[in-house]
Amino acid sequence: MKISDYLAPERVIFLKSTTKADALEELIQAAKNFSENITLEELRKAVWEREEMMSTGIGQGIGIPHVRLPGLEKITMAVGISREGIADYESLDNKPVHIIVLIAVPQGQHELYIRLLAEIVGILKREDLRRAIIEAKDASEAYRLLTQMGI
């Protein structure tokens, strides 16, 4: 599984936001033109519906908002990095979130969806890689780390 098949370099960004709402909006905007069939408004609605069920802050500075969208052609990802951390993310460990991985998956690709989610969680739980991504000099270095060091 190659993350570069799902994550375009321009969809890795350093977040300017300090709140969960603003950070998720930055990621949604980074995903622009991700689909011919799905609008950003539909993506936004799906992301917030998912967050209302339960926060996607899984602990260790990681947030993984993930949605399934009928009509989506292929899996798409966007990654937001916050050096300061998003304190109000409502993470399971109540700590700030530094890396947010937004995943949008077509309906009906459940097995691939679960494999991708597990791969991302497994890799980002590595503290060395997480720290390197947060400390990357720019988004292109962060993309390289994400795509060449495992994810």
Image: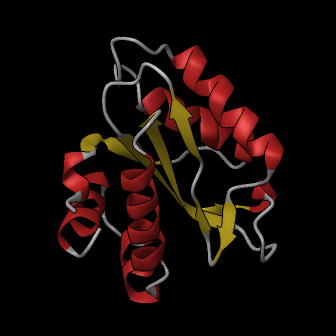
Quadrant placement of the C terminus: bottom left
- In the figure, residue 30 lies in which quadrant? top left
Image height check: is 64 above or below 37?
Answer: below
Q: Position of residue 140 (x, y in %)?
A: 23, 54
Q: Residue 38: where, in percent of width, then height?
A: 45, 15
Where is residue 145, by image quadrant?
Answer: bottom left
Residue under the point 36% across and 77% down: 132
The residue at 49%/13% (across/down) is 39
Q: Quadrant of the N terminus?
A: bottom left
The residue at the point 51 percent across, 38 percent down is 27
Q: Is residue 56 left or right of residue 27?
A: right
Residue 89 versus residue 108 in the image, above or below: below
- Display coloring: secondary structure
Number of numbered tags placed on the structure image: 0
- Does residue 59 lie above or below 50 as drawn? below
- With respect to residue 3, does 6 lie above or below? above
* Residue 124 at x, y percent in the picture: 45, 75
Front residue of 107 and 84: 107
In this rendering, position of residue 61 left or right of residue 31: right
Q: Residue at x 75, y 74 (%)?
A: 95
